[in-house]
Amino acid sequence: MKNTKLKKRFRMSPMLVVLLGFLAVMSVGAFLLALPISNTLGTGEWLPFTHVIYWATNGVCGTGLTVKPTALIFSPFGQAVMFILIQFGGLGFMTFATMIFILIRKRITVKDRIAIQEALGLDEMKGVVRLVKNIAIMTGIIELAGAILLAPFFCVRNGPIGIWQAVFNSVSAFCNAGFDVNGTPSNPYGSLTDYHSNAGILIIISVLAILGAFGFPVINDALKCRFRWKKYRLHTKMVIIVQLSLMVVGTFFFLASEFNSLAMKDMNGGEKLLNSMFQSVMASSTAGFSSVNQTDLSSTGRIMTCVLMFIGASPCSTGGGIKTSTLAVLILMGICGLRGKDEITVAGRTISIKTGLRSVTVLFLATALVIFSAMIMSATDPNITQTIGSANINNDVGVYFFECITAFTTTGLSNGAAPYLSSGALYLQAVIMLIGRIGPMSVGMIFVRSEKNSITYPNANIMIG
């Protein structure tokens, strides 16, 4: 009897298993990145502890912020370690673990299935193992196709190394990681700024990022229904409509706000449209590649980038943010509230009050986390805007919000602050990334015990607004 009570007391929740799994992989990744064989310094030095923890967290969380240029600081071995961390981060701990269990033919228990369900944010446990198998197949096909399509563009410009750049960028784009190995001594943190006029590369990267942002259940549903819109689940329709709407609106918004800005003033009309589209897709999918310098964006453009990053991608995807379905439910709640309805309804369906409460909770936790993080960063690094050295953002407190939002949403678009941040600020960003990758709601559930009320209490009327 006592043993049973002890087991119940110390039984780990599924989300705690996921968190510990991420921390374990981050620790191993950080150790490998710290090794002298991982860097190009050539002096047998180990990389700083703070930096490797930051890099490993970025890789596992699929963020793409970096304190040194990935292409220049890491040796082929170090780049391979980052590549594996990015792939792991895109698939997630439970998905990766399940794939290994399947390969070694280990039995997947009910507890494992519950953990997979929680990690993927699914409503039911049925079919989770089959979905994981489909995820592995879809990921391999999409990333391979992306690498094959990108290879000619990179090889023509950079020679044989272009093959590795194509593979790395394809995986990074689909996993919405934002890491790249394109840096050069003259443009170390350039991302894709040297390719801002290359429509082929920008469009292929955008398509990969969009597919990653849609999420595996959406892609699976589309394939299962053979792309017949009427047969799609409500979740699939909602995700596609919201995600594409944000990208289209963002494209024309950036085209208008950045038409004469520092970021695009030297481009022709076609290039401005192309790069506006790319900026919108990278922000809303939280992929994090950039074809223009983020410090050169107008204040309006940076605010829009923050909004798109904060909303982010879709559930069970490789992207971050509060998620498009959360935004959709919040909008529907607002519409139903204005109409005086007691239920959340859409397309002949009723969305449960529980889903509505979860959406509000996610929004509240995310907003609170970003605000408090920005306040802490402004205290630890009060002069960061001057340190960055861009007249366009000098004394702009919005930089703190931008850097915290890009960390929470695991986007990786940056004003270039990471190389100049203090150790405290780097650790702060690492924590924000981890919470953003797992989800603020999921992290909260680790510390708060869920309760099911069997008692119905009387209604209480409270004045609102």
Image (cartoon, rainbow, N blue to C red):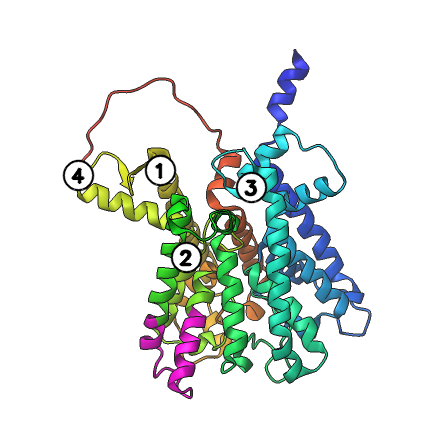
Tell me which segment is drawn in magenta.
252-279
Dot 4: what SS?
loop
Q: Where's residue 97, x and y in %?
A: 68, 43
From this viewpoint, is residue 295 visible? yes
Which of marks 1 and 4 precedes in the sequence?
Answer: 4
Which of marks 2 and 1 precedes in the sequence?
Answer: 2
Mark 4 crowd level (few <14, some 14–19, many ≥20, 10 Å Cα): few
Dot 3: what SS?
helix
Dot 2: what SS?
helix
Instruction: State the residue at coordinates (57%, 33%).
Output: 114
Residue type for callout 2: Phe
Q: Quadrant of residue 179?
A: bottom right
How many angstroms separate mark 2 from mark 4 (CA)?
29 Å
The residue beneath circle 1 is: 357
Q: Where's residue 176, x and y in %?
A: 54, 60
Looking at the figure, which quarter contains the N terminus?
top right
The residue beneath circle 2 is: 310
Q: Are marks 3 and 4 in contact (CB under 8 Å)?
A: no
- Image label count: 4
From this viewpoint, is residue 412 visible? no
Task: Classify residue 181 as left or right of residue 317.
Answer: right
Residue type for callout 3: Ala
Task: Classify residue 393 as left or right of residue 70.
Answer: left
Whether residue 249 is situated above or below residue 31 in the rendered picture: below
Mark 1 crowd level (few <14, some 14–19, many ≥20, 10 Å Cα): few
The residue beneath circle 4 is: 340
Residue type for callout 1: Leu
How many angstroms separate mark 4 from mark 1 (CA)?
18 Å
